[in-house]
Amino acid sequence: MSNLLEKLEGIKIRFEEVAELITDPEVIADVKRYVKLNKEYKNLEPIIETGNEYKLVLENIETSKEMLSGEDEEMKEMAKMELEELEAKKDELEEKIKMLLVPKDPEDEKNVVLEIRAGTGGDEASIFAGDLFRMYNKYCENKGWKFQMTSNTEGTAGGFKEVIANISGNGVYGIMKYESGVHRVQRVPQTETQGRVHTSAATVAVLPEAEEFDLEINPNDIRKDTYCSSGPGGQSVNTTYSAIRLTHIPSNIVVTCQDEKSQLKNLDKAMKELRTRLYNLEYQKRMDEIASKRKTMVSSGDRSAKIRTYNFPQGRVTDHRINLTMYNLQAVMNGEIDEIIEKLQTAENAEKLKESNL
C-alpha cells in the first residue's frame, strides 16, 4: 500500500508540473512540445482522480476503525458495516490504480492505416482478404469510427490482392493493433469442385498513423507521379490525372492514392500514408524489442506470426496467442470481434503488470 501511495505522490508532483507547463506561453508556442505535454496531462488525469478517491477511502477506513473502539454499540455496528464496504472499495481502487499505472503505448490514441494482403492460397486468399476487409469495415461502423479505403488491387475471382484503408476515431490503434499478423482460413473454396477443405491466408498490418510533427520528411527525397484513376468514380475516371504515386527514394517506399477526385486530396492522403510507413520502420524496431521480452505475442506487431484461424466447416475461430477458441464464426465475420480483442487486452495487461512489479 505504501508503495502505491509513494507512486501516486510522485505522479501528483509531475501532474502539477505539467499543468503549469501547458499554460506557459513559451511551451504553447512550441506546438510539438505542447501537444506532447497535453497528452501527458490527459493520461495522468484519471490516475490523479482515482488516487484522490483512494486516499479518501483510506481516511474513512481510519475513521471507521476509531469508531469501533467507542462505547456506543449502535455506532460500532454501523462502523463495522461501513468498514466492510470501504475495504471492498479499497481493493477495487487498488486494482484500478495498478491498471492505470501500467505503462501505455503512446501510439494507442492514434488513428491507423490498415493494410490487408492476400497470402498463400491463390484466388481463395484474395476472397478471404475481401472477407476480412468487410469484417473490419463492419467493426468500425459499430464503433462509430470513420473507415476509408485509399487504394486496392482486386483479385481475379473477387476480393482483394491488396487493400489499404484509413481508420480514424477515438483510441483506434490501442484496439486495432491486436489484428496485426497472419490470419488463416479453412473452408471449401468457391472454385473447388471436389468439396475439399483448403487452407489459405491473408496478412493484416495495422500501422499507427504518424502525425506531421512525429517526423520530418525532406521534400527532395520524394518523387511524385500523377496518373489517371481507374475503377468507379464517374466521369473524371481515366480523364484527369488525379491519382497520386509517391516514392520515397532513400527507403524505396511507394504509396498510391486514387480514391478522391481531387489531386490535392489524394496527395494529402498519400503523404499521410508515407509518413506513417516511415514512422513505422522505427516503431516496429521498438515493438520487436518489447515482443522479445513478453511471453504472449499479443501486440508485438510481428506480421509473420500466425495469430488466428477461421474454420468454416466447424464454425470455429481460434486465436493462437491466448489459446482462445470460440464457436461464433458468423458473428465474427460480421464484425463482432470485441470479445476477442478484450481477452487479448486482458492477457497483455496481465503481462505488463508482471513486468511493472506493482
Image: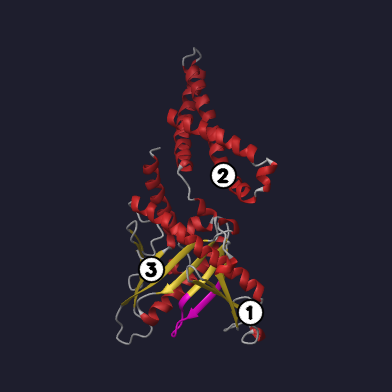
- Element carrying mark 2: helix
Residue picked out by circle 3: 183
Q: Classify residue 342 as left or right of residue 319.
A: right
Which secondary structure class fits the magenta region best? strand
Q: Which mark is residue 334?
A: none
Q: Residue at position x 48%, y 57% from top?
A: 175
Circle 2 packing at 10 Å, graded few (<14), some (14-19), many (20+), is some
Q: Which residue is mark 2?
A: 40
Answer above or below: position of 228 versus 353. below
Q: Is residue 51 visible?
A: yes
Q: Which residues are magenta?
A: 149-162
Residue type for callout 1: Ser
Q: Residues within 10 Å of mark 3 (few under 14, many from 20)?
A: many
Eye-nearest disc, 3 or 2: 2
Look at 49% across and 62% down and name the residue there.
207
Counting residues from the start of the chain, the first of labels 1 and 3 encountered is: 3
Q: Quadrant of the N terminus?
A: top left
Residue 255, horizontal then vertical, whole percent: 53, 72
Question: 123 and 67: which one is in front?
Answer: 123
Dot placed on the residue nearer the N-terminal end, 3 or 2: 2
Which percent across, then down, holds residue 271?
A: 58, 68
| Residue farthest front in this picture | 220
Determine if the magenta segment contains residue 123. no
